[in-house]
């Protein structure tokens, strides 16, 4: 039995838009033949069909400037001292607001939620990397460090040619790993090897504790490729791997109506095939004109208003370098 075309809240079919016959025998109207006017109700309905981790609570709200989504994370405040009574209490911590334009395609709103969750999780991941130097524990990858202050006062240290104790590769790595914890887990060297091109391959084991919470780190071994074995290089390589694994965890578990769109197990050849089915067909002349006008209208709505000033002048100089008049 052929399924009927179903529209979600906030969606409308363009006049005279074609229905596309898919290889499974069903008809659909692809998103590029729809117009959108999303409201708080339609965005909330989409969020109701999204599942990830119940600790990541996705809100939709509206204010004078428009619709937005915001992720709240149920967890511990990473900056409470251990001695504090609040250290073990969980609370709802809110991330930044993500604007939702009413004319956005439904798929793009779902992907905005996906990205908001990813970045909220990365925010937490960056704070879980702790480095102990000079008897003080810090979180150097956190996003709260005063960037304007750094831009004004940071000076890169000059390399001092002083006599250093010669350490083996294993000793140098282990010395760095003793200074690092991640999600209340410790790290240990499994194997290190230098390739003929000079790069180092470093395998590191993760040892979780009872306080560790990140599921992707269970029985994990990290595989790094670095140019040198300094604390700076190893720390940055570790942080990049932690973020990669966090992103992959979201890819695998984020779903809309049970479909895990970003899971690596979804075959890209199948995705490409479905995309081709919705685009490889001729448009009738009477609809092609309507389709073109609608797209132009949406494109014009995306152009930001520009006020005279320093930023406008900067943008003007940049754009003129690339968009020279014809002839």
Image (tube, rainbow, N blue to C red):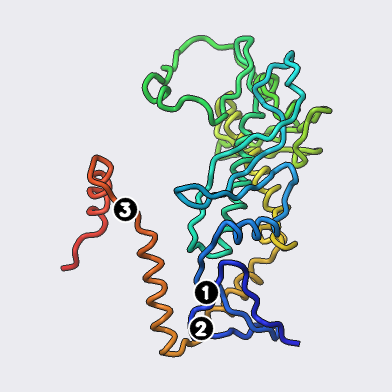
Secondary structure of residue under mark 2:
loop
| Residue that mark 2 sits on | 17
Q: Determine the CA span between mark 2 and mark 3.
A: 32 Å
Q: Are marks 1 and 2 in contact (CB under 8 Å)?
A: yes
SS class, disc 3 = loop
Residue 168 visible within the image: no
Residue at screen point 26% across, 56% down: 322
**125 is higher (above) or lower (below) than 278:** above
Residue 318, given in percent of the width and then of the height, sits at 26, 49
Residue 190: x percent and y percent?
75, 32
**Count of numbered tags:** 3
Is disc 2 in contact with disc 3, using a CB cutoff of under 8 Å? no
Instruction: Using the image, determine if residue 13 lies above or below residue 88.
Output: below
Q: Identify the residue at horizontal 51%, vertical 68% (top origin).
A: 36
Spatial CA distance of label 1 from label 3 is 26 Å
Q: Residue 195 lies in what quarter of the image?
A: top right
Relative horizontal placement of residue 104, taking residue 222 as reference (left or right): left
Q: Percent from the top left, x then y, of residue 315?
A: 27, 48
Out of 243 and 165, give the one closest to the viewer.
243
Position of the N terminus, as image quadrant, is: bottom right
Secondary structure at badge 1 equals strand
Q: Where in the figure is residue 233, as x and y percent of width and height?
A: 56, 29
* Mark 3 Cα-neighbour bin, 10 Å: few <14, some 14–19, many ≥20: few
Q: Residue at x 38, y 69 (%)?
A: 297
Q: Which residue is mark 3?
A: 305
């Amino acid at each position: 039995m052929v399924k009927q075309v179903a529209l979600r809240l906030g969606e409308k079919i363009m006049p005279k838009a074609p229905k596309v016959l898919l290889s499974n025998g069903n008809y659909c109207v692809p998103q590029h033949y729809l117009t959108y006017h999303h409201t708080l109700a339609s965005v909330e309905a989409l969020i109701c069909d999204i599942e990830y981790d119940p600790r990541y609570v996705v809100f939709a709200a509206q204010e004078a400037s428009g619709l937005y989504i915001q992720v709240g994370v149920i967890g511990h405040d990473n900056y409470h001292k251990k001695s504090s009574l609040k250290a073990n209490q969980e609370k709802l911590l809110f991330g930044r607001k993500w604007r939702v334009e009413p004319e956005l395609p439904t798929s793009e709103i779902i992907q905005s939620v996906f990205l908001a969750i990813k970045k909220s999780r990365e925010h937490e991941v960056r704070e879980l990397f702790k480095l102990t130097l000079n008897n003080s524990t810090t979180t150097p990858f956190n996003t709260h460090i005063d960037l304007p202050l750094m831009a004004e006062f940071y000076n890169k240290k000059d390399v001092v040619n002083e006599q250093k104790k010669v350490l083996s590769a294993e000793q140098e790595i282990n010395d760095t790993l003793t200074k690092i914890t991640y999600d209340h887990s410790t790290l240990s060297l499994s194997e290190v090897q230098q390739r003929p091109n000079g790069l180092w391959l470093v395998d590191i084991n993760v040892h979780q504790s009872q306080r560790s919470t990140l599921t992707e780190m269970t029985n994990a071994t990290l595989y790094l490729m670095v140019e040198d074995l300094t604390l700076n290089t190893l720390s940055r390589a570790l942080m990049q791997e932690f973020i990669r694994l966090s992103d992959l965890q979201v890819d695998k578990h984020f779903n809309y109506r049970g479909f895990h769109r970003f899971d690596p197990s979804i075959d890209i050849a199948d995705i490409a095939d479905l995309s081709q089915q919705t685009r490889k067909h001729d448009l009738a002349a009477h609809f092609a004109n309507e389709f073109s006008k609608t797209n132009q209208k949406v494109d014009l709505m995306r152009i930001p208003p520009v006020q005279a000033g320093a930023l406008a002048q900067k943008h003007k100089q940049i754009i003129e370098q690339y968009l020279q008049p014809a002839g």
